[in-house]
Each structure stands twice: as C-alpha cells, then as structure tokens.
Amino acid sequence: MILTILSVILIVSGLVFFFGAAVGLMRFPDFYSRMHAAGKGDTLSTLLVISGFALYQFRDIHDFSHDWPVLLVVLKLLAIVVFIYLTSPTSTSALADAGWEDGIDPVIEPGRENHLEDDCHRTPPSSPQP
Amino acid sequence: MESRAARSPLYSALIFGVLMVIWVVFSGFLDPFHLSLGLISCGIVTWLSSGLLFDDQSIPIRRRAVQTVRFISYMVWLTWQIVLSNIAVLKLAFAPRSSLQPQIVRYRTPLKTDFEKFLLANSITLTPGTVTIKILGDIFYIHAIDDGAASGLNGEMDRRIARIFETREP
C-alpha cells in the first residue's frame, strides 16, 4: 500500500514537471529558450515517472525466491532512465546547434551579450528562408 | 587502424562481464541454451570491439573502479541539480515575460579530454537555466535564460568533473 502511494506520488510529480515543460515550450520567446523547457523537462519527468513504475513493480514481490524475475523488469526500466540521461541533453545541444547553423536568430535581452554572434560566423543557409 | 597491441586481457574480461550482465538482464532466461547463446554473442562482440569501450587500456582497472564510484556520486549530485533546474523552468513557465533575460555567453573550460567535455556539456544543459549550444576547442557557447544562470557558470562543475578523473589515488 505504501509502495503504491509512493509510486503514485512519483508518477504525478513527473506529470507536473511534464506539464511545466509543455507550458514553457508554448510561452518562451524563442527557439533557444524553448530548448530549456524541452531538454530539462524531459529528463527529470521521465526519471520520476519510470522510477514510479519501477517502485510499483516491487509490490508484486511476496516470496523473493519465486518472484525474483520482477527485478529484471526493474533493471530494464533503469536502463531506459540511463539512455534518457545520455541522449536527452545531447539531443538538446545538437538541436540548438543545428538551429544556430540554420540561421535562427536568438532573442537577446537588450544590453546582454551574444558571444556566439561575435565569434562564430555562420555559413549562409543553403536554401532561402521562407 | 586500431592498435591491437594496446588491448589488455583484463579489460577484455571486464567488457565481457559487462556485456554478459546486460545479456542476462535483457533476456531473463537462465537455461543453458540461452546462456550459451549469450556466451557466444558476448565473446564475439568482445573479440571484435574490445578497443571501442575504453580508449586507454594502460590505465589500471583499480583506478577505473575509483573513477566509477566517483562518477556515480557525481550523477547523484547532478540529479539534484536537475531537480532544481526543473523547479526553475516550472517557475519561469508561469512567470511574466519580463523575468527572462536570454543571452549567449562564452565559457572557457580547463578540461582536456573529449569525454570530460561531453560530460560538462551535458551537465550544463541539465543544470538550471543553461543550455550548451556549441563547443569550439576549449570554448563553450552557452545560452543562459536569465542573469542568475549566466553568473552561475563559475567553474564549480569543472572542478567536480576534474575530480572524477584526477590521477591521484584517494
């Protein structure tokens, strides 16, 4: 019973962060700020939801010598978390870089720096902008 | 192409062990037939690609073990940073537009190897308010969503990453 409550708490808090990420995705001013919401929201929300699933699996263990295969399911769920940890921030950076190379201009607060503009001259986009 | 002489049998055994554990977890069958299939597959993969997983096989296994323990404790710290970062995004998502001060800053790192830079880039992306856009040599270009995030890049993370891989024994 306690396990069920804990896993429900984990899954629901994961969904709250997913919701925040989705709202951020809609409201942030430009492509690069939206990557903040998408890249970070995904990672923690997936971690929380999948840990919730993993914890829920332990509910089925009554007699360990008979029910141990449940542990394999838990380990597989943890493997998903590891892959998300590796790929989510990497793809966020890759997308942001691709956006820059493709000529998407960031919204910069007046008076703040854009060092990338200063140092890195973009190759002109291969196709004309729509 | 690849330097076969640099391979060490200890490393091959380690890679074989890791692959075999993954095989058993993903297959879930412990009967002789499936286990022998796993032994054959892992043996072939170890033989073909044992140079891929670890670059420098002259480093003693013992130091790799120390690095692994430090790496795991770093991941625990990073997970806490991710929690903070998500709370920050959640707040910003519902805050008025004027609370954002987007900017792109330059950041120079003392870290040298590709893996350390990869770890730093991913960590910067996962911590509050910053996303790595580009790495050119030692210089990282980082999109910061407000002034606080931009001033938070003070080298603490570099030190934590450098500590994982430092050669001094604890």
Image (cartoon, coloured by chain):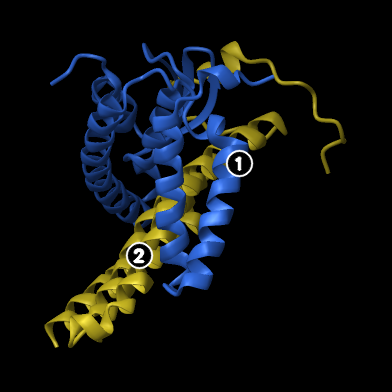
Residue drawn at x 31%, y 24% as measured from the top left: B153
Q: Residues within 10 Å of mark 2 (few under 14, many from 20)?
A: some
Colour of chain B in the rendered structure image? blue
- Residue A23 visible in this rendered orientation of the protein: no
In the rendered view, tell whether residue B100 sits above or below residue A121: below
Please state if A23 lies on the left or on the right of B64 as rendered. Answer: right
Tag 1: amino acid: Leu
Residue pointed to by mark 1: A95
Q: Are marks 2 and 1 in contact (CB under 8 Å)?
A: no
Residue pointed to by mark 2: A75
Q: Position of residue B41 (x, y in %)?
A: 58, 54
In the rendered view, tell whether residue A98 sits above or below residue A81: above
Colour of chain A in the rendered structure image? yellow
Q: Nearer the viewer, residue B83 or A2?
A: A2
Q: Position of residue A120 (x, y in %)?
A: 63, 15
Task: Give residue A55's quadrant in the image.
Answer: bottom left
